[in-house]
Each structure stands twice: as C-alpha cells, then as structure tokens.
Image (cartoon, rainbow, N blue to C red):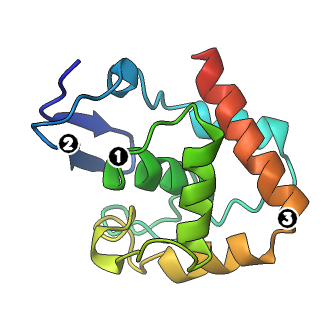
Amino acid sequence: MLILGGFWSSSEHQQFFHTNLLSTSPAYAQRVPSTDVWQQVYKQLPDLPKENQYISKQTGKVAESNTLVSRMISYHVYVKGRTPNYRLDWKLTLADYLDANEVMYESSYPGNDTLRKNPLAGDRAAIRRLTRQQRNSLVQALVNTFSQN
C-alpha cells in the first residue's frame, strides 16, 4: 500500500503526516492510533508516569489526555514513520528518547504546537527514570495494544 499523507486528530491536537512517495507502507496508517490506545497502555501499566501536567495553549487548562504515551505514539508513528506493532521499532523510539539513536527535535515533537511548554525534556527525563524492565514492559504493552487493533 502506498500512503501519500493523511490526517489524524484528537481532542488535543491535529497533526499532518506523510511518508516517502517512493516507499511502501503497511496498512497500519489507516488504523492507528485510535483515541484510546494510550489508555489501554496505561491500563496494562498503571504505574507508568502520565506526564500530563502540561497546559493547553487553546484552553489554558491542563491537557490531561495529552500524555507521555500519547505523545510517544504520535512521535513513533507520525514523526518517525515507524510501524507500531514491532518491538524493534519501539526499541528504536526508546533509544531516541535516551539519546542513543536519532536526534529528536523540539520543533517537531508532539505537543510543541498545542502545549504552552514543550514536553520533550520532561518526556525524556521520564523515560530515563524507567528501569530496563519497565522500558521492556512499555514496549510489550505498546506492541500488545497495537496487535489487538
């Protein structure tokens, strides 16, 4: 399947995504993410930090549904164009957060346009505080959730 672009929207923000016109992409882009994927991950990992204390630019209130996991999913799928149902791809994303893989840019990080303060530094700190076992559990929860959809 060739994906040229599309829209994904949630109550907190909208993002445009695109892929290389010369590459093929799996059909996951049509199904991902449903608005409750991040909630399913938190059900599996209730102790995972939500990092949802940031203030919405639009409402001036705390954007409670704009969580670490929701931003991580947006970064993974729409900024990096990685598939959501493979462990290796999620490990690459975690490596980005840990400064061990690709550079992450504040200007393209989810929440940059919709939150008063860019959450990238806080999200990276939250990921760094997780143990290896917690990071592995996060990867597995993400894969499990996307494999069910």
Q: Secondary structure at mark 3?
A: helix
Q: Which residue is mark 1?
A: 81
* Amino acid at dot 3: Arg
* Amino acid at dot 1: Gly
> What residue lies at 58% left-to-right and 77% top-to-bottom?
100
- Alpha carbon of mark 1 to alpha carbon of mark 2: how far? 7 Å
* Amino acid at dot 2: Thr
- Alpha carbon of mark 3 to alpha carbon of mark 1: how far? 24 Å
Q: Which residue is mark 3?
A: 132
Mark 1 touches mark 2? (CB < 8 Å): yes
Q: Does 83 sit above or below residue 51?
A: above
Q: Which residue is mark 2?
A: 19
- Say which quadrant the N terminus sits in: top left
The mark that comes first in sequence, 3 or 1, is 1
Q: Does 128 sit above or below residue 133?
A: below
Q: 10 Å neighbourhood of mark 3: few (<14), some, or many (≥20)?
A: few
Front residue (pair 98, 51): 98
Could you say where residue 105 lies in the image, as x and y percent from the top left?
A: 34, 77
Q: 10 Å neighbourhood of mark 1: few (<14), some, or many (≥20)?
A: some
